[in-house]
Image (tube, rainbow, N blue to C red):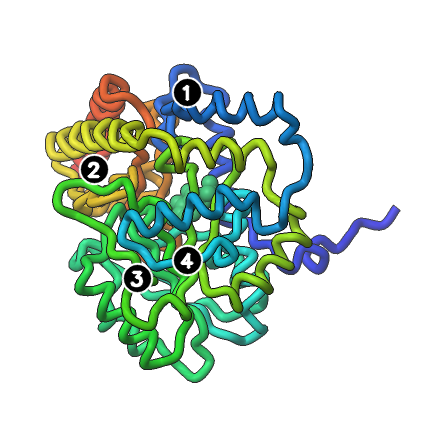
Amino acid sequence: MTTPNTARLAKRVKLSDGALITKMLDIAEGLDDVIKLGRGDPDLDTPAHIIKAGQEALANGATHYTHPLGIAPLREAIADNIRAYGGADYAADEIMITPGGQQGMFIIALSLLDPGDEIIVPCPGYNPYQQAAEMSDAVVVKIPMTLATNFTLTAEMIEPHITERSKILVLINPNNPTGSVTPPDEVRKIAELAKKHDLIVISDEIYSRLTFGNNTVLPVASLPDMKERTITLSGFSKAYAMTGWRIGYLAGPRDLIMPMSEVNHAFAISTAAVSQHAALAAMTGPQDCVEEMRQTYDARRRAICKGLDAIGMGYAEPQGAFYVYANVASLGLGITAGAFCERLLAEGRVMMYPGTIYGDHTDDFVRMSMTQPVDRIEIAMQRMAQVVESFRADARTAAI
Ligand code: PLP
């Protein structure tokens, strides 16, 4: 029997990031009572009226393929919702429902990127953008963001990276993993830059309903002459706690949405009908559930920040989404975020992910998801304080 040459066969798939998560999940498997602040999957349930709409849809025969763009009432409801939150004016055929926002990224990359095209992505930033671009043989141009600007992408940072081959600029607002919100004035400057250099903007606004304090998201496509060059990516997973329903959407000008609809059709034919009917209930039903969840995350955010303050660990100001990006290097222990996460999990039974998973050029930060109730977060912060104390004790012993 011959052994397959996996290096050749697996050319397009880079395993490194996923392997780290798998390793953490494997360690967690063997432990009791792990407090999971890793995945960006809300512990909160999908609101009851949305579940009920899904159940009724199934009972009424929503068991078939739908129009490749998605059912018309849902696309119309999304267009209304985008308008209601100050976004651009879309017709129903300028909205495409996808099996999760994440698949939307791959649809965009496969539809728009030719080999050698450059796509500018914020780093750290949600990493499937990079994977989608790499699988399209595009060149990923990473803009390193830092704590100095609270990990906000600025037009000034982007411009030096623009070349003749630049095609797409990705804005993730609020950002995962850093929780930073790009201020409206900066969004305006980035839009001007996109027009000046003829770039398509992918504006990932999946967390736009989850912002804290005075932070708000200015939808890029609403700015003058931006709708025709912007694809807004969003979905239901975060604001409506619907990760398992696998449904998201893209909004963009018709001449970009139509070719993407062909790719979407080739991938999935259409998004699951039951999920589309549930999403319709999410869009058209009461919206106080979103505000309740936002307030829940806000309380958790304060609990995490309080715990980090007590430990003496720095962090980026969490302005949106449901993550706190904490600075391991600020502890001054000379350890990487990866080493910190592993020991925290093994000894403290608290799981979180290092920022390197999201393309952070340093190994200094960890992402903490606000996906546990406040009482569990408080226990997690106590356990974290103990592990930091063990690291400090080691450092003292090493110094003797
Ligand atoms: N965009 C961002 C910034 C995300 O963090 C995520 C998921 O974590 C997604 C898109 C994809 O979400 P989904 O595929 O569940 O719609």
- In this view, which residue lies farthest toward the bottom? 164
Amino acid type of the residue that numbered disc 3 sits on in the rendered structure: Ser
Amino acid type of the residue that numbered disc 2 sits on in the rendered structure: Ala
**CA–CA distance in space, label 2 to label 3:** 52 Å
Q: Residue at x 19, y 54 (%)?
A: 150
**CA–CA distance in space, label 3 to label 4:** 10 Å
Helix, strand or loop under label 1: helix
Residue of label 1: 48
Q: Earlier in the sequence, mark 2 or mark 3?
A: 3
Q: Earlier in the sequence, mark 3 or mark 4?
A: 4
> For residue 222, which numbered disc appears in the image?
3
Ligand 1 within 8 Å of the CB at mark 3: no
Q: Residues within 10 Å of mark 4 (few under 14, many from 20)?
A: many
> For residue 395, which numbered disc appears in the image?
2
**CA–CA distance in space, label 2 to label 1:** 51 Å
Q: Are marks 3 and 1 in contact (CB under 8 Å)?
A: no
Where residue 335 sits, quadrant-wise, is: top left
Amino acid type of the residue that numbered disc 4 sits on in the rendered structure: Tyr
| In the image, residue 193 above or below residue 314 | below
